Image (spheres, helix red, strand yellow):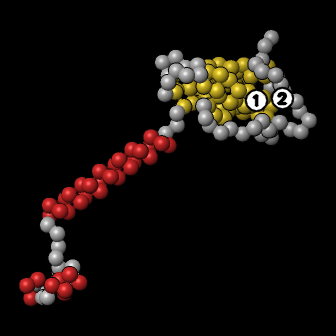
Amino acid sequence: MVSPFQKEQLSPEMVERYGLNHRSIVGRIVTYTLAIAFAVVLGFVAYEVTRPQVDYSLLTWKVLASDRVDITFRVHAVNDEPITCTLRAQDESRADVGYATVDVTPADRSATVTYPLRTTIPAFTVEVLGCGDDAVQAPQFPQGVIPPSQPWSA
């Protein structure tokens, strides 16, 4: 709101109290530029800290037998170091019927893997739980069910 008084009509205390001693436009531009630069740097640092080191996606899966499902997934990493991925298959009630950890070695920071997962009964759904440093759930087989050995072989 614009004051009806001129700065020259008021005492220095009144000018200070009611904010009539505005900064110059150059000061404002410098302040806003610094604030925006700080926000950009802070956003970049936050992105780098929270960016996953490994990106993975489930491509396809197919039940080939009552005790086998083939899982194809892709992994993108920041380097070509070996990565451990965790896979699981579940039945209709969402209980685990297959669970495996798979070592993947990317070439050119990427790898597509098809893994033959052994299951106790036919799988209803399949997922890649995580790769690299991701925290993954432990197997959730029903009580008394022994997890099948991995991988599936003829």
Q: Position of residue 33 (x, y in %)?
A: 24, 54
For the residue pair 78 and 149, the one nearer the viewer reads as: 78
Identify the residue shown where x is 38% and y is 49%: 42
CA separation in Å, label 1 and label 2:
7 Å
Q: Earlier in the sequence, mark 1 or mark 2?
A: 1
Residue that sits furthest to the top in the current view: 154
Residue 142 position (above or below residue 12): above
| Rendered location of residue 139, percent (x, y) | 78, 36
The residue that mark 1 highlights is: 99
Name the residue rendered at 70%, 27% in the picture: 101
Callout count: 2
47, above or below 102, in the image: below
Q: Are marks 1 and 2 in contact (CB under 8 Å)?
A: yes
Residue 78 appears in the figure: yes
Quadrant in the picture for the C terminus: top right
Residue placed furthest toward the left: 8
Disc assigned to residue 6: none
Report which residue position mark 2 lands on.
Answer: 147
Q: Please tell me which residue is depicted at 50% across the width and 43% down the height of the picture.
A: 50
Residue 128 in which image quadrant: top right
Amino acid type, callout 1: Tyr
